[in-house]
Amino acid sequence: NVTNEKLKSPESSSWLSTAINLSYLKNAASKLGDQWKDKYDKAHDYLSKQIGDADAEKELLDLTDNYVVDNCAKKAIKDNKRSGIVHVQTSSTPDKCEDVVSKQKDDGSFELSDTICKELEVPTEEKEIVTTVKSSTPNPKLQSPESDPWWKTALTLSYLNVAAPHHKKQWEDKHDKARDYLSKEIKDPATEKELLDCTNKYVVDKAHDKAVKNNVHENIYVTKLDFDDDTARAVHEGLRAPVNADTDTARIVCDSQQEDGSFTL
């Protein structure tokens, strides 16, 4: 959060967009520095002249460094999780989908299929899985004993959506029946969404873990940014390798520079 009053003024919006571009070039496109150093210096001069306060300028750039690094880290993590999803999708087959949906009951609920457990490499004991995924929410309605079949149903739906979207025609009607079951049982859209968010995360995380175990991933190291210089440098160095911008991206950023040295977003 901004503490310097000068950075809260209406004219600070152009400073912010300029600072974000500077932080992006410095942290995500450092290896292309020879292409944008003159524009970087011009923008830095613009900030110094406009703000006229070294402490406020440092605070602004610290904040935008933090913002850019944090979002680069989130993108890196998201990309890495995607490799796990692709990995589990490649092993999905019509026969496996058939086994999963064969566990649907007349009311629309699902029992957990051994196929899901094997594909995600998790224990085959239903109670253990449900207990684990239940711990991801404090919602009392989702902690109740009566919620166990909801969790098993939601886990099955999440698995189908994450691991078998290319076989959707095979399970879509059963998916819809299961959603109707959850809606009727839970009677609260917000709680139903929370349930599915938890099971989606569980399935994606387990798919990622499986990919890591099978070396189907890229190592991405993310360090939490604090505002001391040593930590900032460590984060910047850690992120430059996996999240480097390409030449076109850096060029687009540089092309947004105005004559006064400021950048637009």
Image (tube, helix red, strand yellow):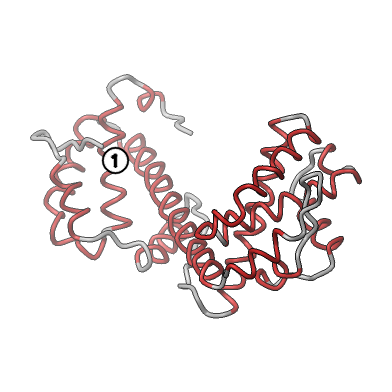
Image position of 219 with respect to 55: above or below: below
Residue underneath mark 1: 19
Q: Residue furthest left?
A: 259
Image position of 195 with respect to 155: above or below: above
Residue at horizontal 42%, vertical 45%? 67
Report the side of 35 relative to 132 (left or right).
Answer: left
Q: Position of residue 85 (x, y in %)?
A: 53, 63
Residue 100 location, quadrant:
bottom right
Residue toward you, 235 or 161: 161
Report the side of 185 relative to 211 (left or right).
Answer: right
Residue toward you, 16 or 119: 119
Residue at horizontal 67%, vertical 49%? 174
Residue toward you, 262 or 103: 103
Query: Label 1: how many residues lie within 10 Å, few (<14), some (14-19) or many (20+)?
Result: many
Residue toward you, 29 or 58: 29
Residue at horizontal 81%, vertical 48%? 106
